[in-house]
Amino acid sequence: MTTDDSILIAGGTVIDSSQAIHAKRDVLIEGGRIAAIAESIGRERAKHVIDATGLIVCPGFIDLHCHLREPGGSASETIASGTAAAASGGFTTVFCMPNTNPVCDSHVVVKFILVRAQEAGSIRVVPIAAVTRDQKGEQLADLGALMSAGAGAYSDDGRPVSNAMVMRRALTYAHMLDMPIFDHAEDLSLTADGVMHEGNVSLRLGLKGIPRSSEATIVARDCALSHETGGRLHICHVSNRDSVAAIRHWKDRGAPVTAEVSPHHLTLTDEAVCAGEGYRTSAKMKPPLCSEDDRRSLIEALEDGTIDCIATDHAPHSPPSKDALFQDAPFGILGFESAFAVLYTTFVASGRWKLDFLIEKMTSAPAEVIGAEWGTLRPGSCADVALLRVGEPYVFDEARVKSLSRNSPWLGQSFGGRVVATLAEGRVVFKEEAALCATDPSAGPCGPRPVVIADPTLTRGRVSGT
Ligand SMILES: [Zn+2]
């Protein structure tokens, strides 16, 4: 017997680190959940069949750090365009930062984001609420109410929580709620008006530098506060070797600290600022791209577990805003649509990592950081799935970009792997033009997703699978 929404993903190679699977497997989806995973499942068991021969089938990617810009920044991105971009990058869950206008520091804005995400009908969006009111770093936001409204974490990202006592209180409350604080670690007095990493390249270009200590001192401070209070601290976008050393030190001492690193910090250095003609604003972000030595320490930290997972820090800025003098352009670059291609090509195609490792760091590893049940193809779990094609050239051209912005340093470059389809809760939310659905793609699971207004179920800060 088949159900109308049943899909069989047949003939692919399943890679799922949560179950230590790397083998040819068929995957059956029913009612938005994984119903079965086995060497062979009869095609008669599903209404729709996706032929995944030659493809990798893995859990949908989870991004703990992105900016969807809505409310208030819809010239750069909307929740609809951002989730479409995420889906085309293989992401099925994204955590969006609260530095919107207004700031996501009230249950009203949390609900607004959740409703907009449901209307967009693509992937799962988990709002991250502000630590402090209006992200001013002074008074704590109503952390309990924000959690009840559906926030999955707290952060003042875009800005640091500069006052140590405010951060200590926030960690203490967050600990009581069993919620993590996502830390944008930056000492603004050290950043001052710096626009890139302080080093030989900034000296050569005559641009004001940001020293490593701007990040590393706050990482060390906040890890110490986490250790003291028991509050879970997740260090965002770690960029340099001194921050890595601080995280390693405090993790060794048992502090409840986790950390993420971005694709750009793993693959680029400050040299990217002046690659080609002029200074590239698509290589300007916070924290800045650092030296090759820093990049190597980030790779080693991800490999040895000091850094837990990969997060994109997808930060769209409208073309006119980035089309400016380097020192005037805003910080941040796109991330969703290039993440897998860039990381696959740099680390897997080159032989440094197994594909299993990369997939783990984009699926089960971020799920573990947040304590969620996603990032797995285990029967009974949400049918969040990415289909990947590797070993075939792929040009990341502008025509493919679904984000409203274009601020990527990788546009026009060729890569050796890509995402070809994405399913979120058993519905096809992205597929390449060549339709992968064997049956009528305008019907059933491949059609538009119905709008359902519902709160995600959040229990004591642990995000459930629904
Ligand atoms: Zn940040």
Image: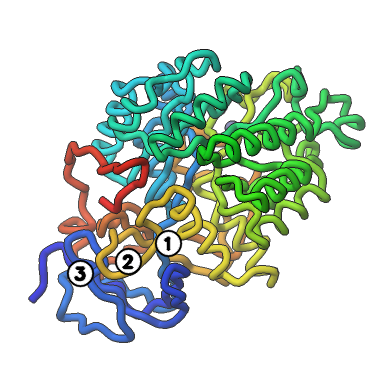
- For disc 2, the marked residue is 436
Q: Which residue is nearer to you in this view: 443 or 60? A: 60
| Identity of the residue furthest to the left in this view | 1
Q: Name the foreground residue: 229 vs 144.
A: 229
Q: Are marks 1 and 2 in contact (CB under 8 Å)?
A: yes
Apparent side of residue 261 relative to residue 316 in the rendered image (left or right): right
For the residues labelled 3 and 2, the Cα–Cα distance comes to: 10 Å
Disc 2 secondary structure class: loop
Label located before the other in sequence (1 or 2): 1
The answer to which image quadrant residue 420 occupies is bottom left
For residue 106, what is the image quadrant?
top left
Disc 3 residue: CB within 8 Å of ligand 1: no
Label 1 and label 2: CA atoms lie apart by 9 Å
- The residue under label 3 is which amino acid type? His
Residue at image point 54% right, 35% down: 229
- Residue 110 visible in the picture: yes
Depth check, front residue: 46 or 459: 459
Q: Where is 134 relative to 449, above or below?
A: above
Q: Are marks 3 and 2 in contact (CB under 8 Å)?
A: no
Q: Secondary structure at mark 1?
A: strand
| Residue 412 visible in the shown view | no
Question: What residue does disc 1 label?
Answer: 420
Q: Residue at x 10, y 67 (%)?
A: 3
Q: Amino acid at mark 1?
A: Val
> Would you name the residue on which mark 3 appears?
48
In the rendered image, residue 442, in percent from the top left (x then y), is placed at: 19, 56
Quadrant location, ligand no. 1: top right
Which quarter of the figure has residue 212?
Answer: top right
Q: Is mark 1 within 8 Å of ligand 1?
A: no
